[in-house]
Amino acid sequence: MNETAESLSNKPGVEEPTVAALLSDVRGRLRSAGIPNSGLDARLLVGAALRMEIEKLILYSDQRVDGESVHRVQALVNERVRRVPVSRILGKRDFWDREYKLSAATLDPRPDSETLVGAALEQCRQSGRGTIRILDLGVGSGCLLITLLCELPGSVGVGVDLDPGAIATARLNAETHGVGDRAMFLCGNWTDALWGKFDLIISNPPYICSDVIATLEPEVALYDPLLALDGGRDGLIAYRKIIASAHPLVSENGCVLLELGNGQLAAVSSILCDAGFAVKSVNQDLSGISRCVCATPVAN
Ligand SMILES: C[S@@+](CC[C@H](N)C(=O)[O-])C[C@H]1O[C@@H](n2cnc3c(N)ncnc32)[C@H](O)[C@@H]1O
């Protein structure tokens, strides 16, 4: 039996722990395993195991926890100690106020990517269009495309991913959020199977340099799919492929919106300009990093 289970198990004669004691014990165990943000993770794991919203943990802090629930907590904590991210343990992640199911094939959506959503909404509102045709290249869990479809009720969208598992998860998330009838999901290599015009092409492509991946925190390096991370030797391979084929797919007055890795603005802007696009705007994330670039096709 592990350390925490021993201290909190429901042996005869041993008092059931209170929610507060369990939380404190889990926090301590995560902290000593070197898990960052151990306080928040402890609340999320205990809340999930007790099937209680984390805000309610304080309200019920004096309540006793039965042995079965303590063991459920332990199982989750054991996974976190192995550096499985909380979102992967729970199989879901909040993004732009909605919950998305994750799978082994999907990136765990990052709060930074909400910058792209904000920029996309800004572009769509400026355009004044009613119906907006959106293309999401590398759709993953669907968090970007589905958020936009929910926020822009007149819009329709296509999501593409090379991984069939990601496509299945995105489709499930679209149904859950009530936009399945406005979304189409295709398994394929970037724009290969596409034709027609889109008013907004978005992508958060894999942009980590190959040799950096092993140095990332274990939560990312071990649990995000390599296909979602690996941008090749210089991190820019996916940008080159996407940008090279995007021009004919952008409608008149349409635009391309790309998420950027830290420090990639100049290189991606130059790829865009070489392919006949003009940079229209750049949005920064909450840390002040240039996180996405919006570009429009230059008329021939
Ligand atoms: C960084 S993830 C972004 C996922 C999601 N859009 C998000 O923001 O959370 C990049 C996505 O691109 C997909 N991908 C990688 N190579 C691809 C390719 N050649 N064609 C289509 N999708 C690809 C990956 O499977 C992954 O889902």
Image (tube, grey):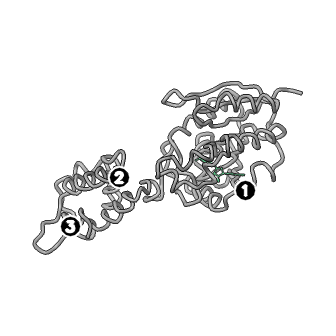
Q: Name the residue under label 2.
A: 44
**152 to 49, vertically: above or below:** above
Q: What element carries label 1?
A: strand
What is the distance, in whole Å, between disc 2 and disc 1 at their CAs? 34 Å
Position in image of residue 237 (x %, y %): 72, 43
What residue is drawn where x is 60% and y is 46%? 211
Nearer the camera: disc 2 or disc 3: 3
Q: Name the residue under label 3.
A: 6
Q: Name the residue under label 1.
A: 186
**137 to 258, vertically: above or below:** below
Crowding at mark 1 (Cα within 10 Å: few <14, some 14-19, many 20+) = many
Crowding at mark 2 (Cα within 10 Å: few <14, some 14-19, many 20+) = many
Position in image of residue 285 (x %, y %): 53, 31
Position in image of residue 43 (x %, y %): 31, 51
Q: Earlier in the sequence, mark 3 or mark 1?
A: 3
Q: What residue type is labelled 2?
A: Leu
Do tag 2 and tag 3 residues touch (Cβ < 8 Å)? no
Q: Is mark 2 on a helix, strand or loop?
A: helix
